[in-house]
Image: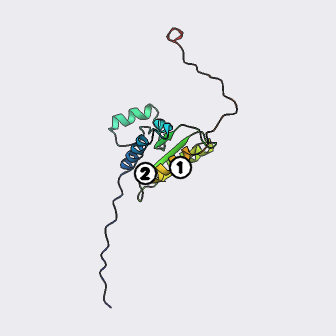
Amino acid sequence: MTKTLRLTSPKEPDPPEAWHQEQIFRMAELNKAEHPELADLFHPPNGGFRHKATGAALKRQGEKAGIPDIYLDHARGGYFGLRVELKRFREGVPSDEQKRRLLRLQACGYRAVVAYGWRIAWAEILRYLSLPPTIPTEAPPSYNPIPTRREI
């Protein structure tokens, strides 16, 4: 029996998560005129490689494991906001802590998802923005009004 040599093209590279995230924020910048809420889309500076002393200082300041990568704090479709844990398209896997955190956020009324690659994340953001605004039945009283300098 003879073996046939099959030439296959190499797999398209799977860029790092940071690249995927940059694409999302580039798209947000390009689409702010159509969706002004995108001006509030942000990434909390959590995780990533840091010097040991910097990492220890950030931990003392409240940095936590498993925090999602992307936040959009606009209430839509009965949710309080959107949280996206971004992963590489082929090689990304959420950690157990990330899964637990997303489940806790879902239980608290957030749309919290894992998105594999920037295109899926971007589609999720647009889908979320297409939901009707969540209108509170009664506005809660302000418990922390901004004080003037004289009151401080």
**Secondary structure beneath label 1:** strand
Q: Nearer the viewer, mark 1 or mark 2?
A: 2
Q: Residue at x 50, y 37 (%)?
A: 37
Are the residues flagged by discs 1 and 2 in contact, CB closer than 8 Å? Answer: no
Q: Is residue 45 visible?
A: yes
140 left or right of 31 in image:
right
Q: Position of residue 33 (x, y in %)?
A: 46, 38
Q: Position of residue 53 (x, y in %)?
A: 34, 34
Type of the residue with mark 2:
Trp
In the depicted view, which residue is nearer to us: 149 or 130? 130
117 left or right of 145 in image:
left
Q: Position of residue 50 (x, y in %)?
A: 34, 39
Which label number is shown at residue 149? none
Determine which residue is flagged by label 1.
113
Determine which residue is flagged by label 2.
118
**Secondary structure beneath label 2:** helix
Q: Is residue 95 visible?
A: no
Type of the residue with mark 1:
Val
Q: Most extreme residue toward the bottom, as rendered?
A: 1
Mark 1 or mark 2, earlier in chain? 1
